[in-house]
Image: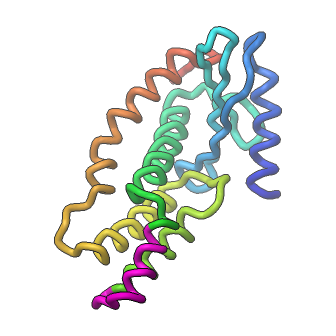
Amino acid sequence: MSLIDDLERSAAAATALAPAGASLTAVLAAEPASGLRGYLCAFEGADGGRSWVVVDDAGVPVTDVGLLRDVVSIAALCEIAEESAFGSDLDELLAQLVALRLTENPPGIDEAEEAVRELQRTIGTPPHLATPARLDELGAATRRLEQSLDPVAPSPFTAALKTAHTTVDELLREVETSYLLPLGD
């Protein structure tokens, strides 16, 4: 079964729990540990308020707060990593590097072009399964690109992830306070 099939199946299971008048706005697949998958589902009500539920791979709602936090955290971190992977459009950056290679051909330009292509492959096309390994792959590909462009500059990606805990904590609070079911230990 493909990830798209899993997302559709999980969306159907989550929709059965939706508050009246709320619509499903997002389903993110996350696997905080091997074989432990959850689907973070967001709903938006007619009043604009959000509510949340996580369903497991069998479509059963998660009520264990530890598992909920693990799923939300890795999903959020991977989203932040994808958004922070490079500050501008990678297609535009690649076009600029190709033009620079054709006009000036500075040393290291080939490595920089390949680093952009590697990051594009790593980011890929949605949907994605958020995992610790994916987070590591995004970090490694982004750092390779950063170093190929300026080997001594500090990493904007690393800086973004160092402050990501604030965003993750805020999301966790929102999910927990507007969760569709009571949470247990």
Residue 128 location, x and y as percent? 63, 54
Residue sitting nearer the eye, 112 or 173: 112
Is 110 left or right of 12, judged from the image as shown?
Answer: left
Residue 6 location, x and y as percent? 77, 48
Which residue is found at the position 33% from the left and 38% from the top?
165
Residue sitting nearer the eye, 147 or 113: 113
**Which residue is situated farthest in the left direction here?**
152
Which residue is found at the position 63% from the left and 42% from the top?
28
Residue 129 location, x and y as percent? 62, 53
Residue sitting nearer the eye, 6 or 82: 82
Quadrant including the N terminus: bottom right
Q: Identify the image quadrant of residue 7.
A: top right
| Residue 136 forms part of the magenta stretch | no
Q: How is the image coloured?
A: rainbow
Image position of 149 with respect to 173: above or below = below
Question: Magenta residues?
Answer: 93-108
Image position of 20 with respect to 87: above or below = above
